[in-house]
Image: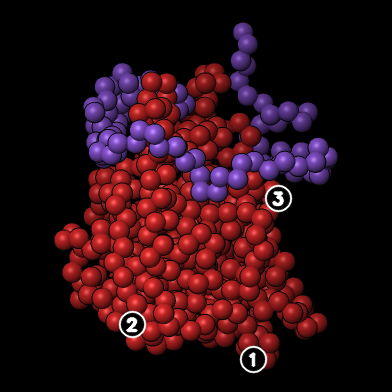
Chain colours: A red, B purple
Amino acid sequence: MIEKTVAELSAALRRKEISSVELARLFLERIDRYKDLNAFITVDAERTLAQAEASDERLARGANNPLTGIPLAQKDIFCADGWRTTCGSRILSNFVAPYNATTVDKFNQAGVVCLGKTNMDEFAMGSSNETSYYGVVKNPWNPALVPGGSSGGSAAAVAARLAPAATGTDTGGSIRQPAALCNLTGLKPSYGRVSRYGMIAFASSLDQGGLLTRTAEDAALLLNVMAGFDPRDSTSVDEPVPDYTQSLDQDIKGLRIGLPKEYFSQGLNPEVMKVIESAMAEFKKLGAQVVEVTLPNSQLAIPCYYVLAPAEASSNLSRFDGARYGLRAKDYTDLLDMYCKTRAEGFGAEVKRRIMIGTYALSAGYYDAYYLKAQKLRRLIAEDFRKAFEACDVIMGPTSPTTAFRIGEKSDDPVAMYLNDIYTVPTNLAGLPGLSIPAGFDSRDLPVGLQMIGKYFDEARLLNVAHRYQQVTDWHHRIPPGFDE
Amino acid sequence: MSLTREQVRKIALLARLHITEQESIAYAETLSRILGLIEQMNAVNTDGVAPMAHPNEAGLRWRQDAVTESDQREKFQRIAPAVEAGLYLVPKVIE
């Protein structure tokens, strides 16, 4: 059962081979057995089983949603009514959300069962899941290594078969990079495709909710529920949601794959390069053509992102002040001191660093040189993609410059950590959809991810291309050693 | 670009973050390093380029000026650190 995809579990539930309650128990038992991975921050078996029971009743009455009864892990960034929602932070360690994020609402309505809240880098700031107040998450492929971040808990959970799928969020690569490091399919939809209402904000112009699954087909099934216009999210786009499963099997003969020459410079790890080259050979067999494209301003994506994201974060995180919810410091003199002490005690080091940089970039006298400059670079980067898409349909390349690295290896040097995002941040800056899929392994038997970037609102095409690749390869079926039972 | 401890203290105040003398030294160093990364932005001339605030430049939607939410003050205040008579309690601001 743990090997079945969401699509297969859906069929099994309908054929009454298993009940939603039995399925939930199975995964809850595994979550407990492998709690050493630290993939979950909150598990509430009673709540989960109550949801599963309700779903079993709906199934008995003939539920017509294919996801009714399916268990799903939720990244602890989505507010869920009655569930502790911490965002990986001490400042929200006692915060029990009084409402549902739209994403949670939609899954509830479909009869999906919440398995628990997964661990994550604090306030989604990180690329290794080492900044969480609730401890480091271990990579099931090798527990001495990081699973990636910030959706590290979700990635570890799905990779270790503790959940058939999980939600994540991606601001600079936080779904795609952990998917690459854990051998998963990670989808960041186009900006505006998935509602951000109730999804604790890090950088409002970059954040997007998405999925970590084992197959593109599963991502399509789940995206059908997750996507859609939401009047409560002012940046939500009013575009109808297609059935993403309908186009999965389309022929990709004639597909033009663009490889940006800037992504394949001398710096790229040769083992990662080899995996990407093999993937291109597979795509050519499927009838695609590979063309070289250029994204001239690629080098500027990281500095640009590390101005915009911290600036927006400094604004978004100003709401955490001990006044209305969350942690409040015990000792303070006046109101200002209450704010300053609460935030100093409640936020971790990386969050504070980013708030400081962001505050500086927005402050009087520096706004033009930093924030405004970064917004202009953002325009150039988005333009680069627009031009490149004149010559191709999908852009591909590595998701991450390296495979999983050792816990502690980069946590002392923030700049070294930021460089992990080099292939993923441009997609968030431009608002385009991005998908990472398993494409091979390196000489240490660690997974390598292939990234696909699509035109705005073209996630159907990405899922189709990924699905065709997954029909002729089996990288995505591999299980981390020791987790196959 | 290097930040002084004085600048770090000023930023911390703006950010409403209490920092110690020790921390201000450490921040000056780390933040200066991050600024070094950010200053790579200056490699490109952006004169005449329109800033891009976010991917879909649709602008904010308008809605009817009608009541659509219900009063859930009690539910939301149940998780507050200190409330009284429906008000959030904080240290006195006016002497």
Query: Is residue A39 in sight in this rendering?
Result: no
| Camera-side residue of A275 and A121 | A275
CB of mark 2 within 8 Å of CB of mark 3? no
Q: Which residue is more in the foreground, A260 or A223? A: A260
- Identity of the amino acid at label 2? Lys
Mark 2 → mark 1, Cα distance in angstroms: 40 Å
- Image depth: mark 2 or mark 1 in front: 2
Q: Position of residue A396 (x, y in %)?
A: 35, 67
C-alpha gap between disc 1 and disc 3:
39 Å
Q: Which residue is mark 3?
A: A231
Q: Residue furthest left?
A: A266
In percent of the image, x 20 and y 72: which residue is there? A271
Q: Quadrant of the C terminus of chain A?
A: bottom left
| Position above or below: A100 against A336 | below
Eye-nearest disc, 1 or 3: 3
User: Which is more N-terminal, label 3 or label 1?
Assistant: 1
Residue at position x 53%, y 25% in the image: A338
Q: Which mark is residue A284?
A: 2
